[in-house]
Amino acid sequence: MNIASPMSNCFGQPEGILASAAHAANPNQMLALSGINRKLSKGSTLLHEEDDVKHVYEIVSGTVKTSKLLTDGRRQIIGFFGAGDIIGLPVEFAAFYSVEAVTQATILCYPITQLHTVMGQSHDLRKFVFGHIHSELEKHIEHMISLGRKRPKERIASFLLDFHNKRVEMGFKDQVIELPMSRVDISDYMGLTQETVCRVLSFFKRRAIITSRNSHEITILDLPSLERMAQSSVLH
């Protein structure tokens, strides 16, 4: 693997979230945190399972997915990540999962050794990093609950709401959701068959809960109904 190889026009990128957090925590520090800017084409792999981990990755643009291959050959997608998300925390010596580009993506690659050094200089940066780890753990717990306790309609409703809520956090006020991944990817993430995913989305359309212009763009028509659907299993 060639993670450390920069693209042809790579350059230090202090504008990333981690680098900005490091600078804000200690603007006078002598050792700055900067990442290598790397471009990924759709379908290319950034990190293979069991590879040596040398970087923490911040998504600048595009969408990537993390996945793990099961012993019987099936694949479980662990998560989808977009702009502003960080992959690789907490740091492991060997990769637990693979990282692959769902779309064309731009990634900042922060050397782990550099991150450790800068974190050692700043309590505020350590607090930021641990806060991110805590947030990701909460998301994984919510997803485990969804897989273990929710019915298919409720899982898909939760999935759509996750994307909607992230857009709200980013300042978008419309009800449009971009889903760049395939229906197969969604099924491998939700623990459902592709046919079930398509059937549930069709059910939501018939109930006028959502509509879609194409397979990658969904508009929420009835947000309260979608929210009730997502919560119905955990309330009973």
Image (cartoon, grey):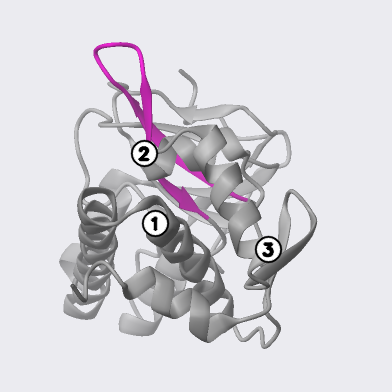
Q: Return the mark for residue 191.
A: 2
Report the front residue among 2 and 122.
Answer: 2
Whether pointer 2 and pointer 3 mark residues with C-beta atoms closer than 8 Å, the reply is no
Report the front residue among 5 and 208.
Answer: 208
Report the magenta residues as a range: 63-81
Q: Secondary structure at mark 3?
A: helix
| Residue 106 visible in the current orientation | yes
Q: In this rendering, which labeled residue sits more in front, label 2 or label 3?
A: 3
| Residue 61 visible in the current orientation | no
Residue visible at 56% across and 82% down in the picture: 223
The amino acid marked with disc number 2 is Gly
Report the front residue among 145 and 127.
Answer: 145
The amino acid marked with disc number 1 is Arg
Q: Quadrant of residue 31?
A: bottom left
The amino acid marked with disc number 3 is Arg
The stretch drawn in magenta includes residue 80: yes
To which residue does mark 1 refer? 155
Percent position of residue 157, x then y:
47, 64
Whether pointer 1 and pointer 2 mark residues with C-beta atoms closer than 8 Å, the reply is yes
Percent position of residue 92, x then y:
19, 38
Q: Quadrant of residue 155?
A: bottom left
To which residue does mark 3 refer? 206
- Would you place residue 192 above or below residue 137 in this image? above
Percent position of residue 131, x then y:
23, 73
Q: Upstream in the sequence, badge 1 or badge 2?
A: 1
Whether pointer 3 and pointer 1 mark residues with C-beta atoms closer than 8 Å, the reply is no
Q: In this rendering, which labeled residue sits more in front, label 3 or label 1?
A: 3
Residue visible at 46% across and 60% down in the picture: 159
Cα–Cα span, label 1 and label 2: 9 Å
Q: Secondary structure at mark 1?
A: helix
Residue visible at 70% across and 33% down in the picture: 41
- Would you place residue 33 above or below residue 127 in this image? above
